[in-house]
Amino acid sequence: MEVLIVVPKGFDRFAQNENLLLYERLMKLLHDESPERGPLAGRQLIAGQGLSQEQVSHAWFVGISKGLLQEFKHWHTWRGKRLAAKPLVHKHRPENTLISVPEVAQDGGFIADLMLDDRNELMLDHLTGQHVQGMVLTEACRQMFLAVTERFCLEDYQAPKRYFVINTMTMRFQAFAFPLPAQIRYHVLEQKKLRADRVWFHADMNIYQGGAVVAGMEVKFTVFDDVLITQKENQLAASVVQQYVNELGMLNAQSDVTDDVSAFLSNQATASCPEQALL
């Protein structure tokens, strides 16, 4: 059976390649009077990257109800992994999560799948319609170090809520990534407990697609007790606000002096030329 990979309209240029189909076109064909005898018949349909879980489920139910059991037999082939939850990636909206739940890899590192949703906050604008933009891959790597650390690396850390501070983050781009399966492989290079309330990490990761590295990140970050770092953050915020308030106060003072000088010069000019006051 010929394979058709289904992607959302955000990747419309990519969908012009062979063996690809836009989701909107799929749904139109499914709602035709006799889809079992149409262009979808005898095709193997695969849910590609960028589709929401709602879209995947809706297309499957419609397809099955139309009698396309064989065509949708492998529909979920690339959808087997579970999306990482909010406590791991620190995202409230599921469409903004870009990775699956990380697992321990055979080499002792960690691995997760890249999971795209066309409604993601970073994919609402500036899409080429062909490749996955670099900022999406950067955010996926950021979520990876959050998720791995939260799930595997803080067993001895007592703080119930943690605050991550990035010290350095270097991104590498080696090739275009496309809306097809991709995996992130992550390794902790060094870990230090600096104090009771903070742990420092040095990690590196690569994003693989088609067996080749397309991007990677080296990162150093520190995990703090949220209560302590929030207090410090609040103090810094108040200090910066006060700095700008003081600057604005100086501007007002300078403005008052300028107004006084202007008024004085105007009075002097009127006094020296009294006839002008009669005009």
Image (spheres, rainbow, N blue to C red):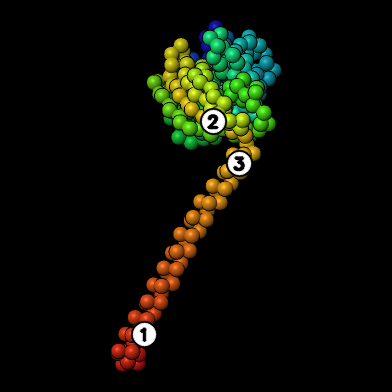
Mark 3: secondary structure = helix
Instruction: Using the numbered discs, state the Cα–Cα distance from disc 2 to disc 1 in whole angstroms.
Output: 64 Å
Instruction: Using the numbered discs, state the Cα–Cα distance from disc 1 to disc 3 in whole angstroms.
Output: 56 Å
Question: Residue at position x 66%, y 31% from top?
Answer: 159
Rendered location of residue 48, percent (x, y): 55, 19
Numbered mark located on residue 222 in the image: 2
Rendered location of residue 243, percent (x, y): 49, 55
**Above or below — where is 224 with respect to 172?**
below
* Quadrant assignment, res 16: top left
Numbered mark located on residue 228 in the image: none
Question: Residue at position x 51%, y 29% from top?
Answer: 221
Rendered location of residue 166, percent (x, y): 50, 32
The quarter of the picture where the C terminus appears is: bottom left
Marked residue nearer the N-terminal end (2 or 1): 2
Residue holding disc 1: 267
Mark 1: secondary structure = helix
* Quadrant assignment, res 120: top right
Marked residue nearer the N-terminal end (1 or 3): 3
Q: Residue furthest top?
A: 1
How many neighbours does mark 1 have within 10 angstroms: few (below 14), some (14-19), or many (20 or more)? few
Marked residue nearer the N-terminal end (2 or 3): 2
Question: Residue at position x 65%, y 22% from top?
Answer: 155
- Say which amino acid is labelled 2: Thr
Instruction: Using the numbered discs, state the Cα–Cα distance from disc 2 to disc 3 in whole angstroms.
Output: 14 Å
* Quadrant assignment, res 28: top right
- Say which amino acid is labelled 1: Asn
Viewer-side residue, 123 vs 165: 165
